Image (cartoon, helix red, strand yellow):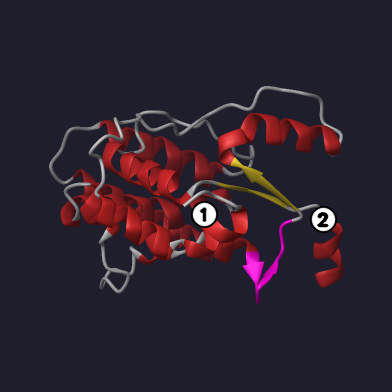
């Protein structure tokens, strides 16, 4: 319902496009095993608990076919949606396989950051289209921005603190999870790669006011 939607205060977080792509590349290269983010499922959602426990165990084993096993585990639990529709288990099963496949395809097709940026949007897997979307595309509909507040990652602590107090929350420290290991940016990318990023994400640079 549009009226209900408009009653909500909507916010988002954006980031400098170059820094965003570097962070994305680093995280895909390093994988998602280094910093588990605890998820507290509903007590009644047994399927989700079983799925997550199995998924965590599978990621810890040292086996050449680990990726295949993870996909099988995800596909098996995707069947749960036929019997237990709308659960956290359904969502996890649907997304975990995609995340693994993105990591796998990136590692197979890009040896460094320059090659990562050049991954084709029309790749048969369809997994690389996400690397071509501007952040503005996610928060706009028919050129109308739907977010009421836009926070910047570069000033996230202060921006979020102001926003939180505005909506009635007490001041608190915002945790930083899924943090990738930073690399020396010197010689990390070519000038041509930077030009491609600026051109690809021109809308983000202009709308959010990032320096080119």
Q: Magenta part of the protein: which range?
A: 140-147
Q: On the image, numbered disc 1 is attached to which residue?
A: 91
x, y percentage for residue 35?
A: 41, 28
Q: Is residue 95 left or right of residue 209?
A: left
Circle 1 residues within 10 Å: few <14, some 14–19, many ≥20 = some
x, y percentage for residue 131?
A: 38, 60
| Helix, strand or loop status at disc 2 | loop
Q: Is residue 123 left or right of residue 150?
A: left
Q: Choose top left, top right, bottom left or bottom right for residue 118.
A: bottom left
Asked if residue 12 is among those painted magenta in the image, a careful observer would answer no
Q: Give the residue drawn at x 75%, y 53%.
A: 10
Viewer-side label of 2, 1: 2
Which of the two labelled residues, at mark 2 and mark 1, occupies the earlier sequence position? 2
Q: Give the residue drawn at x 53%, y 46%.
A: 15
Whether residue 33 can be seen here: yes
Q: Which quadrant of the figure contains the N terminus?
A: bottom right
- Give 135 or 200, whichever is nearer the viewer: 200
- Give 114 or 181, whichever is nearer the viewer: 114
- Give 159 or 80, whichever is nearer the viewer: 159
Asked if residue 141 is among those painted magenta in the image, a careful observer would answer yes
Q: Residue furthest bottom?
A: 142
| Helix, strand or loop status at disc 1 | helix
Q: Give the residue drawn at x 73%, y 30%.
A: 161
Q: Please tell me whether residue 165 is drawn above or below residue 8 in the rendered image.
A: above
Q: On the image, numbered disc 2 is attached to which residue?
A: 8
């Amino acid at each position: 319902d549009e009226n209900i939607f408009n009653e909500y205060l909507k916010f988002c977080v954006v980031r400098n496009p170059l820094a965003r792509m570097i962070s994305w590349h680093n995280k895909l290269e390093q994988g998602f095993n280094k910093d588990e983010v605890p998820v507290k499922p509903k007590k009644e959602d047994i399927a989700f608990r079983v799925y997550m426990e199995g998924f965590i165990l599978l990621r810890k084993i040292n086996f050449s076919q680990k990726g295949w096993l993870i996909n099988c585990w995800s596909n098996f639990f995707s069947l749960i949606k036929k019997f237990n529709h709308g659960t956290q288990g359904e969502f996890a099963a649907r997304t975990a396989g995609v995340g693994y496949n993105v990591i796998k395809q990136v590692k197979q097709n890009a040896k460094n950051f320059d090659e990562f940026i050049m991954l084709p949007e029309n790749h048969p897997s369809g997994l690389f289209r996400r690397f071509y979307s501007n952040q503005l595309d996610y928060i706009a509909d028919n050129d109308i921005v739907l977010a009421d507040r836009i926070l910047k990652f570069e000033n996230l602590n202060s921006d979020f603190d102001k926003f939180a107090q505005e909506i009635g929350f007490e001041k608190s420290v915002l945790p930083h999870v899924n943090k990738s290991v930073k690399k020396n940016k010197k010689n990390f990318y070519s000038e041509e790669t930077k030009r491609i990023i600026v051109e690809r994400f021109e809308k983000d640079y202009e709308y959010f006011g990032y320096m080119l």
